[in-house]
Amino acid sequence: MPALIFDCDGVLADTEVDGHLRAFNEMFTQLGVPVQWSLDDYAEKVRIGGGKERLASLFSDPVGAELGIDEDARAETVALWHRTKTEIYTRLVSDGLMPARPGIARIVAEAHAAGWTLAMASTSAEASVRAVLEHAVGVEQAKAFRIFAGDAVTNKKPSPDIYLLALDELGISADDAVVIEDSENGMRAANAAHLRTIVTTSTLTHDENFDGASLVVTCLGSTADGVELEIASDPFTIAPRGEVQLTHIQKVLAEPLLHRGA
């Protein structure tokens, strides 16, 4: 059976602003780091794959010299920052501050019932991914997923490594899987692994370049909840109405890989 592979942040829930950004800033305050990222700051940081990598970029920022952290101690410091941030983020998820995006629970249930393989492929820490997944689809449904996350690979998106790892571990070919992403970096990673991609745009990614996606929509849609998708790009005329259903994903799988810029 085919596989449906999800990114986490921005796909399962719109986590970046109310989740990750808030958790980073709370961590900075808690640990006495003289930094607070604005929404504009974070819109740039989010283009860096991986939370540790975003934190490490502080040492290249103008504030880096003010931190007074010796170069030999930076890796250990980043690990502490990231561990603390993950604890804060997980609490925010458990507090229910980031509801699942429309259609996520529906499409997961539909794919699982049809026997599809389900997986997560994210650059976020595994604890964070698992927390969001369980909140978005329920603890029992989350057990059906294989999770590939965090430091499972060295090179983060837009490198294809996390998707190549997922394909290898799942024992499937790229022609047997569809990815759901929300960012240009994520789409580029999936495309580089020769995976067909559906993009559901999120708060920080709606204006990015999604040439190479098989379908771009505002969300997966949930007509039962009165939330219908809007189509931003549909090069293969998949033509979902109201919501993306499993039949639409099967149509995407049947089409050729659309290379970026095609």
Image: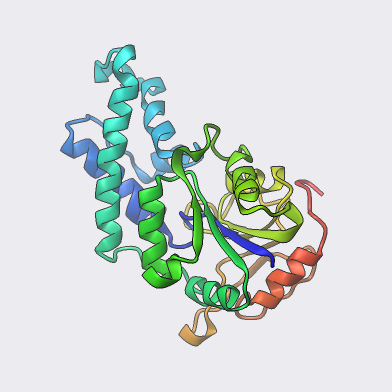
Is residue 100 visible in the rendered structure shown here? no
Q: Residue at x 28, y 34 (%)?
A: 81
Q: Relative to the observer, which residue lies in front, 147 or 63?
A: 147
Work out whether residue 117 can be spotted: yes
Residue 37, position as x, y percentages in the image:
33, 39
Which quadrant would residue 2 be assigned to in this image? bottom right
Looking at the image, which residue is at 50% across and 79% down? 227
Query: How far across and down, in percent of the image, does residue 229 sit?
Result: 58, 74
- Which residue is nearer to you in this view: 234 or 77? 77
Q: How many marks?
A: 0
In the image, residue 88 above or below residue 33: below
State the image coordinates of residue 13 (x, y, percent, origin top left).
43, 62
Residue at (57, 78) in percent of width and height: 113
Q: Nearer the viewer, residue 61 or 136?
A: 136
Question: Is 243 drawn above or below residue 35 in the view shown?
Answer: below
Colouring of the image: rainbow
Q: Quadrant of the N terminus?
A: bottom right
Quarter residue 143 falls in: bottom left
User: Where residue 238 sits: x, y (%)?
Assistant: 75, 72
In the shown orientation, is residue 70 left or right of residue 195?
left
